[in-house]
Amino acid sequence: MLVFLVRRVVNAIGVMLAVAFLAFMIFRFVGDPVELMLNEQATQAQRDELRARLGLNRPFLLQFATFAGNAARGDFGISYRNQQEVSALIAERFPATFELVLVATFLSLVIGIPLGVFSAIRRKSFLAQAVQFVSVLGVSLPSFALGILFILIFSVNLQWLPAFGRGEVVSLGGWTTGLLTASGRAALVLPGITLSLFQITLVMRLVRAEMLETMRTEFIRFARARGLPDRSIHFRHALRNCLMPVITMTGLQIGNLIAFALVTETVFQWPGMGLLFVQAVTFVDIPVMAAYLMLVSFIFVTLNTLVDLTYALVDPRLRQTALAGGSNVR
Amino acid sequence: MSAESAVPAKEGAVRRFLASDLGYSFRHSPVAIIALVLLLLLVVTAILAPWIAPQNPHDLKQIFIDKAELPPIWAKGGEWPFLLGTDPQGRDVLSAILYGTRISLAIGAASVAVSMLFGITVGLVAGFFGGAIDNILMRIGDTMLSIPTLLVAILVSALFRGLLPPALREPFAATILVVAIALTAWVQYARTVRASTLVERGKEYVLAARIIGVSPARIMRRHILPNTLTPVMVAATLNLGLAILSEATLSFLGVGMPITQPSLGTLIRIGNQYLFSGSWWLVVFPSVQLGLIVLSVNLLGDWLRDALNPKLR
C-alpha cells in the first residue's frame, strides 16, 4: 500500500512539474513581458532594469526552478494587465467559480440520478426513449450556444432571470457568496443549469448503464423472490449499488467542470476565474494564464490521485498495478 | 466513358456495404439512416455553398448596407432572398452559415485526421517496440490527459498565436486550430492502438512476418494496423463531433477563427453581441446548424459503436 501511495504521489508530482514546464514555456516564449509591461517611450535602461528585476536575464533552468518554486508557494507574480498580484486576483475570483461548479454538480446529481433510474427501469417506454434522445441532444449542443439560447428566452423575452453577473453577494471573511441573497440565487440559476447540462447527461447515462447491469444480478432476483415492492428494489437495493461509480465520476469531473466553467462564465459574464483567464488570453496576460493553468491542473491531478488512492484502499487488487491518469471525458 | 464505368463500381460498394453485417444493422436503424441523410445534406450544402448560397458573404460588392439587420423572411420586415435575415453589415445569414459550415467541417475533419495519424503512429510504435519508448510516449500521453482538454486547446492556440507575427495570425488561424484540437485528442487513439498492438504483436502471423525478414515499419503498417482499426473508427466518428464543438467553443471564446473567415462558432460570437438588440436570428440559426451537425455525427457514432460491439449483437 505504501509503495502504491508513493508511486501515485510521485506520479502526480511529475505531472505537475510537466504542467509547470508548459506554463513556464508559455510564460517565457509568448511575447516579451518587458515589451508588454512598459510603454513605447521606455528607455533601454528602463527595459534592462525591468528585465533584471523580473529575473529574465538569468539562465533558463534557473528561471524555471524559481518559477516552479514560487508557483508551489502560490506566488505567480504580477498581472501584466492590471499590475496586481496574480494570487490575489485568483483568490478574489475563486469563490464565484467554486459556487457555480458546486451548483452544477448538485443539479447534475439531483436531476441525473432520477432520470437515469427511470430510463433504466422503464427502458422500453416512450418517455425513457425520449429522455435518451434528449440526452444525445444535450451532448450535441455546445454549452455556450445553450447558454445564449437560455439568455434569449429567460432574460430577453420573458425577463425572469438576470443574464449576467452574480447579483448581490455577501462577504464572509474573504469568501464571497451569492447563495444568501435572492438576487444572488437568481443569478446562479441560468449559469448553473448551463454548466450542469452536459454533466446531467453523463450522470444519467452512467446510472442507466449501472442500473441495467445491477438489475440482472442474483440479489435483485432474490429481492423479487422475497416479494419486496418495486420501489424498494429499485431504490434501496439496486440504486445503492450504482452510486459508487457515480460518486467517483462526479469527483473526477469537478476538474473538468472548473475548466468548462470558463465557457459558461464568458457567456454569462460571471466574475469567476474562467472569465479572468479568457480575458487574460485575449490580453496575453501570461502570469494570469500560467497561474490558472497550474491551479486547474493541480485540482484535477489532486482529485485523480485521491480517487485512485481511495480505490486502492477499497480494492486491494488495484494496488498491484499503479493506474496512471484518469478519465477525461470531454 | 469513365463516368459510366465508375458508377457501377460505386453501386457495387454501396451494395456490398448494405449486404454486410454492418449494413444490416444500418438498414434496421432508422436513427442511423436519418442521421446519415441529415449529415450528407449538411455536408453537401456546405461544399456547394459558393454555388447555392444567395450571396458570397466575403465579397463586399454583393453586400448591401441598406439591407442591414433584416429579420427572417417569415417575420415582419423580412425580404427576399434573405431567408434567414441579415446581419448589421447587410450580410445574408443563410449564406454566412453555409460558408461557416464549410470552415467548421473542414477544421473538424482535418483535426480528426491529424490526431488519428499522430495517435495511431504513437500507439503502434509504443506497442510494437515496448520498453523505454513505450514508457516515455505513454507518460507524455498521461500528462496530456492530466490537463482538461479545453485548456490544452486554448493554451496551444494562444501559444501559436503569440509566436506568430500579427500579420500571419489570420491566414494561419485554421491551421493553428487544427493543431490545437488534434493535440487534445491523439492520446485516445494512441491508447487504443497500443492496447491492440500489444495483443497482436505476439501472434504467429507477426512472428512469421518477422522471420521472413519484413521490416518493422512494414509489419506495423501492413500487418498489425488493419487489426487495430475498428475501435479507432468508432473513436474517430465520436471525436469528429467533439472536434467540431471544440472549434466552435474556441472561436466563440475569441481564440479561434477571426471575423474575416467566420466559422459557426465565430458567427455565434458575433451574434451574441446583438442578443439584447432583438436580432435573435443572428445567434439562433448558427447555433441550430451547429447543433444539427454535431447531433447527426454523434448519432452516427453511437450507432457505429453499438453496431461494432460484439456484446450487443
Image: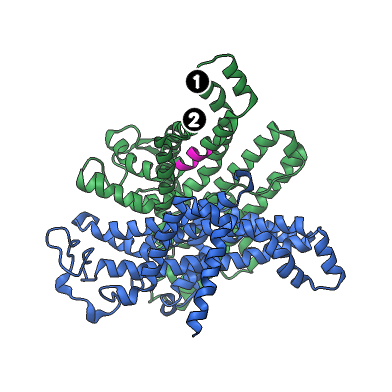
Q: Which mark is residue A121?
A: 2
Q: Quadrant of residue B290?
A: bottom left
Residue A93: percent from left, percent from top: 41, 47
What's the amino acid at mark 2? Ile
What's the amino acid at mark 1? Asp
For chain A, what colour was chosen? green
Which numbered disc, 1 or 2, marks the residue that appears first in the sequence? 2
Label 2: chain?
A
Residue depicted at x 68% and y 48%: A324
Span colored in magenta: A201-206
Give the structural element (helix, strand or loop) at label 1: helix
Instruction: Indicate the quadrant containing the N terminus of chain A: top left, top right, bottom left or bottom right.
Output: top right
Q: Residue furthest bottom?
A: B1
Compared with B141, A250 (above or below) is above
Residue A109: percent from left, percent from top: 46, 34
Q: Assess disc 2: are there few (<14), some (14-19) or many (≥20) residues with their C-alpha within 10 Å of its C-alpha.
A: some
Q: Residue furthest left?
A: B77
Compared with A153, B201 (above or below) is below
